[in-house]
Amino acid sequence: MKKLIAQSLYQQVMREVLSDIETGMWQGDEALPSEQELAQRFGVSQGTVRKALDVLVASNVLYRRQGVGTFVTDAGDDLGSMRFAALNEHAARTPKVEVLSCVKIHAGEYLAEVLNLRRSAPLWQVRRLVRVEGEVIGVDESLLSEVTFPALDMRRLRELGGNIRAMCWRDYRVRLKGSDMRYRAVPAAQTEARLLQIEVNEPVLQVIRLSKDFEDVPQVWSAAWFCSEKYALQSVEMIG
Amino acid sequence: MKKLIAQSLYQQVMREVLSDIETGMWQGDEALPSEQELAQRFGVSQGTVRKALDVLVASNVLYRRQGVGTFVTDAGDDLGSMRFAALNEHAARTPKVEVLSCVKIHAGEYLAEVLNLRRSAPLWQVRRLVRVEGEVIGVDESLLSEVTFPALDMRRLRELGGNIRAMCWRDYRVRLKGSDMRYRAVPAAQTEARLLQIEVNEPVLQVIRLSKDFEDVPQVWSAAWFCSEKYALQSVEMIG
DNA sequence: AAGTGGTCTAGACCACGTG
DNA sequence: ACGTGGTCTAGACCACTTC
């Protein structure tokens, strides 16, 4: 591989590997060629391939198993990978996700803007329920363009455990990056109150997020509402 | 440097450098020796030193400036490094932090447990206010052991812009890691309502965190309450 | 035993910022 | 011009998993 200006070798290798992953050259959970073989293929040294793969491992696109190989990560669910901690307890729990409904709607002004679509563009609206210890603690609403994700099927989504990101990846080869999250405390509206079995206007934790693909195109807009009476939503701060 | 069992060379170098930082060998924002010089000093190659420093850069203990050198990061404030986004807006804002009070109290059962102290151990209670665009949007309460942080001074804390983490680092050589954060939506109590100028029982976003040092000893427990009527708290999701 | 990721070296050159 | 971080190589050996 020849070096181009304004881009280091390992970055070129990284992009090359990433685009090969996106075309589905190595299907999910299948091993990539060894670092040595990739090095030969690209005409660089093993160390350079390693550095390229390091980046993709850090961003959770690949994972490595020593003595075995390097593999493509299956996209994790955004809801499913949230953690909830019971008050005054140390350990955090993994929630269970359940698909409620999946209907076609039309984009309003706001959604058309954030998803970069025209007004009244067709959208899928997916509603999901979040359970911890069997108890409903959250409800989620996700919106995706029907053009990019045609023939979206609720049965298929249920097969994948309600994991929208896995569905985007496996069925449409759209790989989503981690997204910004916005937290607010808002009074529960009727819909949320009913599903969460709480009073209207009780405080609920609202989490808004916008998932983009690796070309930075916004693909999925989501909003979730959590009852935090018994469980707090947990995350990791990135300060040194 | 001789290789020990069960630890790679670059990890040893990393720990060595980290402990040198903690003893204050290279004061804040002063350059470390060059990678070549450190390599000689430790008797390893430059690549190994680089890999060691990579880890510390990733965890935000060090930062690099190409062509200049490697420097010790000055601890960032936990509150001050939060980001707030106006609803329906893209850009996020940096808040201003103001120290309200600093008094000595005694640990109750809960705080004694999480901070690993005996009951009624002396604690500093620091209250701070968070402003965005001049408007008060949050109030914070932090608790630190008086034994570890003797003679804590409110004037000094104000000098540092209310940055508790910077104070722990600069004045007591206690370097705090990033901490877990727990989010809840709760009804505003009287104290919060008064400071945030909202009604009692209005929803407020509660953020609890526990900062530990690099030996995993819990040092600072904090709770913040935010009014999220105009601004949402923003963070970054770590999913691939 | 063979193949994989994981570490390490010695040396080289490039890109950048400062003086 | 100089010194710094940043990249890259060719080759070596280790640790781990699988067969």
Image (cartoon, coloured by chain):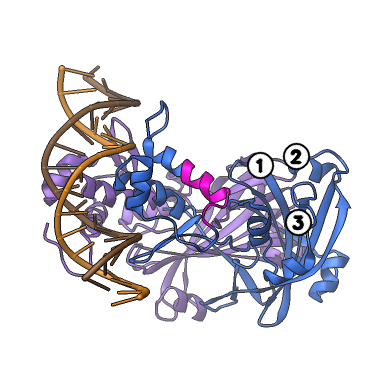
Chain colours: A purple, B blue, C orange, D brown
Determine the chain carrying the residue at label 3. A
Q: Badge 2 is on which residue? A: B116
Q: Nearer the viewer, residue B194 or B116?
A: B116
Q: Position of residue B19 (x, y in %)?
A: 53, 44
**Under tag 3, what secondary structure?**
loop
**Under tag 1, what secondary structure?**
loop
Count of numbered badges drawn on the protein: 3
Residue at the image point whose x is 43% and y is 50% from the top: A157
Q: Which residues are magenta?
A: B15-26
Residue B7 sits in quarter: top left
Q: Badge 3 is on which residue? A: A198
**Dot 1 alpha-carbon crowd within 10 angstroms: few under 14, some 14 to 19, many 20 or more:** few
Determine the chain carrying the residue at label 2. B
Residue B76: which numbered mark, if any? none
Q: Amino acid at mark 2?
A: Asn
Residue B217: which numbered mark, if any? 1
C-alpha separation, residue under disc 1 versus residue under disc 2:
8 Å
